[in-house]
Amino acid sequence: MKKITKAIKWISMLLGVLLLAGMILLYRSDIPIDQLKSKYTNENSRFMPLMGMQVHYRDEGNPNDTLPLVLIHGTSASLHTWDSLVDRLKDKKRIIRMDLPAFGLTGANPERDYSMPYYNRFIDSLLTRLGVQQCIIAGNSLGGSIAWNQALYSSDKIAGLILIDAGGYPKKKEKGNIGFKLASMPLVGNVLAKFTPKALIRKSLEDVYSDDSKITTALEDRYFDLLLREGNRQATIDIFRQRAKPTPEKIKQIHIPTLIIWGEEDQLIDVSNAYLFNQDIKGSRLLIIKKSGHVPMEESPETVYQSINDFVDQKLFP
């Protein structure tokens, strides 16, 4: 009996040591903003003091364009998600993009409010500061949800709407994203705020992309680095805890030219949602992109560019 007790004691100690070693290996401290700036800014990057934050944004492209294109990224992404699209459109359009509060180099909202009204006030304030009187607004995922809500919140400023795999309707039975699922769990989310395995970022990107071969080391590094920006992990957890119920009944109130783009193999927001948007926004245009996932502007940039270019050329806007 004493031998069994002694063996259990040694096994418990060994497990404790292994657990401690695992925690030490997985622990990730926040990355200071100055360290990230040198890596994730360029000559077009600017920082605007706004609503208690230093907001990272880029205002680039054609300075003579009177109807700029405003691009809003999704959860855990950054303004870099639009790089390929901006490269193709900047000779023609003035393009404004930003890191939303909670993400990228902008970081957390000091008030810890991530409600839709908060994001709509944020976008409106940013555009006012930049002197934008009217624009075409585009968003992906969470950014898509913000974009269509913005079209209702400040209808005088939004002349056109582009929704790319946008949020808006109740979840169906999508596979989802492993990182988002874990972050939304009360206890697990708290652990992930300090212990963040890089392998989780890779798996999350595989859930987002249709073609895993397009997930580069640089892409993986960027998502990981910007998640570890001071305050971003806790802010991401706050977002999931504040998530409100969808309000799809409001979508029918949108009456501006709208383009809907969707990756047919989206595992986060099923392609059936594209048809719902197309049905509820009268006169909207729909493009389904085959062999593309949740971020078609990254996976299929040329197809997305052609569709947006055609849309802005249609003379639909005042």
Image: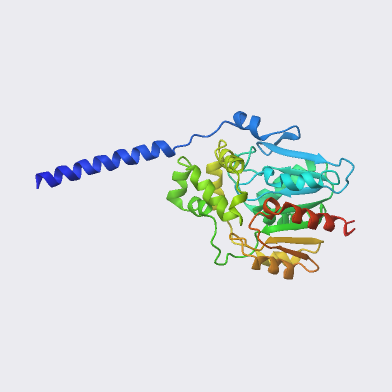
User: In the rendered view of the protein, which quadrant contains the C terminus?
Assistant: bottom right
Front-lying residue, 199 or 152:
199
Q: Residue furthest bottom?
A: 279
Q: Relative to residue 124, is residue 244 depicted above or below? A: below
Residue for point 14% across, 45% down: 5
Front position in the image: 219 or 140: 219
* Residue 299 picture location, percent across and down: 67, 53
In the displayed structure image, the side of residue 122 where residue 183 appears, left or right: left
Above or below, comparing residue 247 to residue 182 in the picture: below
Name the residue located 53 percent from the left edge and 42 percent from the top edge: 233
User: Which residue: 72% across, 54% down?
Assistant: 147
* Closer to the camera in the image, 156 or 148: 148
Quadrant position of residue 231 = top right
How is this picture coloured?
Answer: rainbow
Q: Residue furthest left?
A: 1
**Total numbered badges shown on the rendered structure:** 0
On screen, 122 above or below 254? Answer: above
Residue 285 visible in this rendered orientation of the protein: yes
Horizontal placement of 292 versus 195: left or right? Answer: right
Can residue 242 be seen? no
- Residue 75 is situated, as x and y percent measured from the top left of the image, at 61, 50
Residue 183 falls left or right of residue 275: left
- Quick check: 108 above or below 208? above
Q: Position of residue 269 (x, y in %)?
A: 61, 61
